[in-house]
Image (tube, helix red, strand yellow):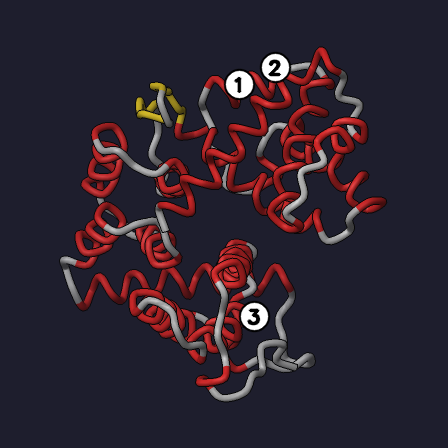
């Protein structure tokens, strides 16, 4: 059953926060390779009115590509004929590779067109998709172009991280020196995580703390905390703040968990009961300065991400 069934387009209006929520959902679906659900959501979004024209163009372009790349998911399939999860993953990756190569055969300039999209357009589903396609195309000039761009241009931290992932998938090696926020960082391409479970355990331990408290106090909060934390960690990967998180004691994980809980709770409810949040996570007065610093970092990331949309 399509969870995004809806009335006619003229009856659907998305408020800004609702649109942000669906954009997050779409990104999560693509990252977890739930392509059928992503197509359903894109069809729903295309019915909505009142959005910027660039959104409709991006959604339609992404939907067209997904329908061509993953026809099984587009048709829904059936339980008896559905491949196993492992076979499905392999099939989808192979089809994505075949599609990228076929595009290259049709157009020798296809890699350069993808590079142009990545380097000249803001972070969106379209740029993430372009990076994914570049993962399957051979050619040293792609590695050189992406590496040089990262080292010389001012790039949004999330787009930087996605590009580093693409370089790792392409088999590139070595260190890349780039500007991460307000500092210079050196990142080893071979060490860039491709999946959540490839990050050090401290990253997931922060979320585990939030899950424990959210289950008791605010069950809906964890989903949003999970998405925000994942995006934030990608944005600070390789920085001093990231290394400090990994080197810190358990109390620092509590501080980050509390700041994350506070940030998401405020976004959802508009309430700022900081004392209650600090009490939940055992954050004492002596830890308050660090708590406020972590909170400011999260808030700054959210603000910069919204401005770049």
Gap in angstroms between the C-alphas marked 3 and 2: 38 Å
Q: Is residue 19 above or below residue 235?
A: below
Residue 247, label in figure = 2
- Answer yes or no: do the residues labelled 1 and 3 have beta carbons within 8 Å? no
Measuring 35% from the left and 64% from the top, which residue is drawn there? 98
- For disc 1, the neighbor class at 10 Å (few under 14, some 14 to 19, many from 20) is few
Residue farthest to the top, as pictured:
286
Residue 198 spot, x, y in % from top left: 58, 35
* Observer-nearest of 307 and 100: 307
Classify residue 228 as left or right of residue 141.
right
Query: Quadrant of the rendered structure where residue 46 is?
Result: bottom left
Residue 243, label in figure = 1
Label 1: element kind = helix
Q: Which residue is mark 3?
A: 37
Measuring 28% from the left and 52% from the top, which residue is drawn there? 137
* Observer-nearest of 247 and 286: 286
Q: Sequence order check: which comes first, mark 3 or mark 2? A: 3
Q: Is residue 156 above or below residue 223?
A: above
Gap in angstroms between the C-alphas marked 2 and 1: 6 Å
């Amino acid at each position: 059953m399509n969870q995004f069934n809806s009335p006619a387009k003229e009856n659907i209006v998305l408020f800004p926060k609702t649109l942000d929520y669906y954009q997050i959902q779409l990104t999560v679906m693509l990252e977890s390779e739930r392509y059928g659900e992503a197509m359903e959501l894109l069809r729903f979004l295309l019915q909505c009115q009142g959005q910027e024209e660039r959104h409709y163009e991006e959604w339609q372009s992404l939907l067209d590509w997904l329908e061509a790349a993953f026809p099984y998911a587009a048709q829904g399939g059936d339980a008896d004929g559905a491949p196993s999860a492992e076979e499905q993953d392999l099939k989808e990756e192979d089809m994505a590779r075949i599609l990228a190569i076929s595009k290259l055969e049709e157009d020798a300039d296809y890699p350069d067109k993808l590079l142009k999209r990545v380097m000249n357009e803001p972070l969106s589903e379209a740029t993430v998709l372009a990076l994914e396609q570049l993962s399957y195309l051979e050619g040293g000039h792609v590695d050189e172009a992406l590496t040089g761009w990262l080292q010389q241009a001012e790039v949004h931290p999330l787009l930087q991280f996605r590009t580093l992932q693409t370089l790792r998938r392409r088999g590139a090696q070595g260190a890349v020196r780039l500007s991460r926020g307000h500092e210079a960082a050196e990142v080893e391409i071979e060490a860039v995580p491709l999946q959540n479970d490839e990050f050090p355990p401290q990253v997931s331990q922060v979320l585990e703390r939030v899950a424990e408290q959210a289950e008791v106090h605010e069950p809906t909060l964890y989903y949003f905390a999970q998405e925000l934390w994942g995006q934030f960690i990608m944005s600070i990967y390789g920085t001093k703040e990231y290394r400090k998180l990994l080197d810190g004691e358990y109390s620092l994980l509590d501080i980050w968990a509390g700041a994350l809980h506070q940030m998401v709770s405020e976004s959802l409810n508009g309430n700022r009961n900081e004392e209650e949040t600090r009490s939940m996570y055992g954050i004492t007065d002596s830890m308050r300065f660090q708590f406020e610093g972590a909170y400011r970092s999260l808030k700054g990331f959210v603000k910069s991400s919204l401005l770049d949309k």
